Image (cartoon, coloured by chain):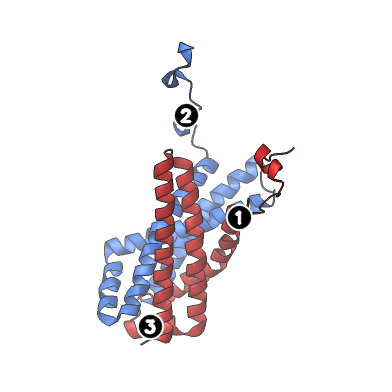
Amino acid sequence: MSANKPGKRPLSPHLQIYKPLINMVMSIFHRISGSALYFGMFFLAWWLFSVASGPAYFDLVQGMLASIPGRFLLFVFTWALMLHAFGGIRHFIWDTGRGFGLSTINWLSWISLFGSFALTMLIWAFGYNLIGVL
Amino acid sequence: MNMRTPLSRTRGLGSAKEGADHFWWQRVTAIANLVLGIFTVALMVNLVGADFATTKATLASPLVAIMLLLFVLSASYHMKLGMQTIIEDYVQSEGRKTVLIILNIFYSVFVGLTCVFAILKLSFGA
């Protein structure tokens, strides 16, 4: 029985063993982006709170969000939202029992990656166009 | 194949019909988030660079307020469900898991309620 000591048992292979395939990477991204949005929702609440608090506090928060770190945060938030939305659509397709072919899984994953990035750029281009930067 | 436990069979009460609750609400809120999220992103892009008066007036208009309220409610429930899954997957110790699941509920309710309060105040209050 000494061979059966806890530390000696073989472990099932985990992340570091596998070659990073795109579907696996996008699955991990789905979780990471979900967590990012989880904490990012705090900023939506904070921003809405600032509007409800009056002009002085609103200007302070708006100024912080418009700063370079603020914009970076909002940009990452936008990308996380798009990535998570694409991931969600992928899961809707899988929920119907379709799209489980290997090649389908791969191109669905690639579409999520590029689509989310393209949509993020588009949204920011619209925003910057609106305030006349572009 | 019968997946029920012997105790459950002895009690004979049948299934509580809540086994798939978490999965189901994750999907329902996901569908809602998709629609309401598009609205919210469009709204935010429209408010880029807007001053206080414009922002306040926009958020206080009934249709915007209703859509935003729906988004905030759906999103905060969705994120509560999602984070709970992550906690259950990665936290091994039973005690820490329970504490984190409770904190997750507190955080999600806090964020959701703050948004709801702010939106309602803008719509109804001064």
Q: Which of these two is toward me, A13 or B82? A: B82
Give the residue number, with chain letter if any, for mark 3: B56
The kind of residue on which mark 2 rests is Ile
Q: Chain of mark 2?
A: A
Whether residue B87 is visible: yes
Of the two numbered discs 3 and 2 in the rendering, the one whose residue sits closer to the viewer: 3
Report x, y in % for residue B21. Answer: 61, 55
Q: Viewed as shown, does residue B80 lie left or right of A43?
A: right
CB-based contact (under 8 Å), mark 2 and mark 1: no
Q: Label 1 sits on what residue type?
A: Asp
Q: Return the x and y of residue A124 as percentages of the image width and height.
A: 41, 66
Rendered view: A113 above or below A59: above
Query: Chain B in the picture: what colour?
Result: red
Residue B35 quadrant: bottom right
- Name the residue rendered at 69%, 52% in the picture: A96
N-term-proximal mark, 3 vs 1: 1
Chain identifier of the residue bearing label 1 in the image: B
User: SS of the residue at dot 1?
Assistant: helix
> Left or right: where does residue A103 sit relative to residue B68?
right
> What label sits on residue A17 in the rendered view?
2
Amino acid carrying mark 3 in the image: Lys
Helix, strand or loop at disc 3?
helix
Q: Secondary structure at mark 2?
A: helix
Q: Is residue B29 above or below residue B13?
A: below
- Image mark for residue B21: 1
Q: Chain A is which colour? A: blue
Q: In the image as oriented, which residue stretches furthest toward the front?
A: B11
Pointer 3 local density, CA inside 10 Å: few below 14, some 14–19, many at least 20: many
